[in-house]
Amino acid sequence: MKVPPRTRRALTRVARDTSFLALGIPLHLLMGFLLFLASGLLWETVDGGDAQAPVVLGVVVVLAVLVVPALTAAQIWRFRRLLGIDIPRPGWRRPLRQAGYHSFTGLLLGALEALLIALLAAGLAAATVYVWVWAVPFEWRIEHRGYSTQAFYVTLAGLGALALVPALSEALVRMETHLGPRLLGPDASEDLAQRVADLTESRAGAVDAADAERRRIERDLHDGAQQRLVALALNLGIAKATLKDLPPEARAVIEAAHQEAKDAIEELGNLVRGLHPAVLDELGLDAALSGLAARSPLPVRLRVDLPPHRSTAEEAEARPADRAASAVEAVAYFVVSEALTNVAKHARAASRADVTVTRLGGILRVVIADDGVGGADPSRGSGLRGLAQRVRSVDGTFRMSSPVGGPTMMSVELPCPT
């Protein structure tokens, strides 16, 4: 006979729950037995009736202390093996909470588990009374002619008890799955703090990986495509200078190709600087920002104030004294670059821009201002949103003030630990 899938799943769940509860009885009641034994020995020690009681009491107390992590490990295995719930091992962290679970909560759960298993056993015995009643002597059945009627009522009671077992076991298992991970596993605040630390570390790794990838692309373009274009422009320039007897049409083509090569070199140079400027690594933020200010179509007044600063001896050896972390420098550079581009493109009536970079303690502060008519809205510009996201990638803060009529000021604060 084929069992319907729904019935098969229900039977499987009941078997799993009852196995889980049955295994929990000795694990939950062991600590109660030790505590009962310790209380009796303590009474005998105080009473003075047994000279060996203090020694045995000490052994029982040491055993109770040592059994706490063992019981915790067994409970964690029980949850994982039978319910598929993985509880992180707490080790010796928060031992009082683990001891409290095994000494008080465990006793209550163990008593409820024992009652449920007893109800299941009694229900099975009562529901099958017509089967095992034939094991009693024949004379007894002759003497008790009304046993069949009594057995009928016992069978009904047994079936009723069996009908209650699935719901009761499910409720008890739900209670244990609510209490067990909370009391046996690490504290929720510890989990949250560890999760935040892991996310911060992974985000920092992603930022570093993206920065390293930009550096690699910049090197490949600079050493590969840009050099080939330079060689092409040089050859075209030599051809234009030496081949004087060419027809005018051919000379026009060479001159156009030469100009296109020079334009391509300039555009590629801008692209390379946009990915990651080599001057930022070689000479630092001050020199890189000076290059940006020199290339800006608007006059830029730049002030960079980076006092000497060292975090550790190793960091001082690896980087100059006035250098921040490479990721922080890259974010500061791209913020200024994007801001100056936005001023040149969108700041109406702007005649100049001011860029101020200062480091105060552990904060690198970048302020970009222009004298335009204002009205910039970060919520409506993908470029400004991208800047804010890039600043937040290193735990920085991004603020912008652009009232109608101006001026517009962008303020960025980047962590630069001392």
Image (tube, helix red, strand yellow):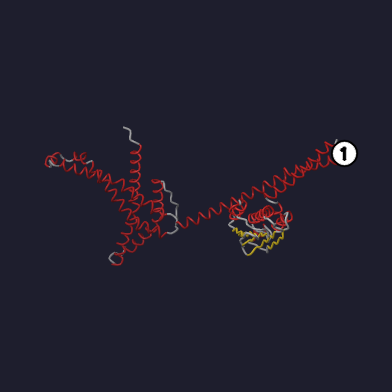
Foreground of the two, 193 or 286: 286
Give me the residue at 82% from left, 39% from top: 252
* Crowd tier of the residue under label 1, counting other residues whose Cα lies within 10 Å: few below 14, some 14–19, many 20 or above: few
Give me the residue at 50% from left, 55% from top: 194
**Is 357 left, or right, of 16 in this rendering?**
right
Foreground of the two, 281 or 333: 333
Foreground of the two, 63 or 299: 299
Instruction: Using the rendered view, name the quadrant where residue 339 is placed.
Output: bottom right
**Is 361 left, or right, of 264 in this rendering?**
left
Q: Position of residue 13 (x, y in %)?
A: 35, 43
Instruction: Using the rendered view, name the quadrant where residue 187 is placed.
Output: bottom left
**Is 133 left, or right, of 255 in this rendering?**
left
* Numbered circles on residues, count: 1
Q: Position of residue 236 (x, y in %)?
A: 81, 40
Give me the residue at 35% from left, 47% from top: 20
Identify the image quadrant of the C terminus: bottom right
> In the image, what residue type sits under mark 1?
Lys
Identify the image quadrant of the N terminus: top left
Q: Position of residue 19 (x, y in %)?
A: 34, 45
What residue occupies the far right of the structure in this picture?
Answer: 245
Q: Relative to 217, say whether 301 is above or below.
A: below
**Is 382 left, or right, of 139 in this rendering?**
right
Q: Position of residue 184 (x, y in %)?
A: 41, 55
Dot 1 lies on which element?
loop
What residue occupies the far front of the structure in this picture?
Answer: 405
What residue occupies the far top of the structure in this picture?
Answer: 1
Foreground of the two, 381 or 210: 381
Q: Which residue is mark 1?
A: 244
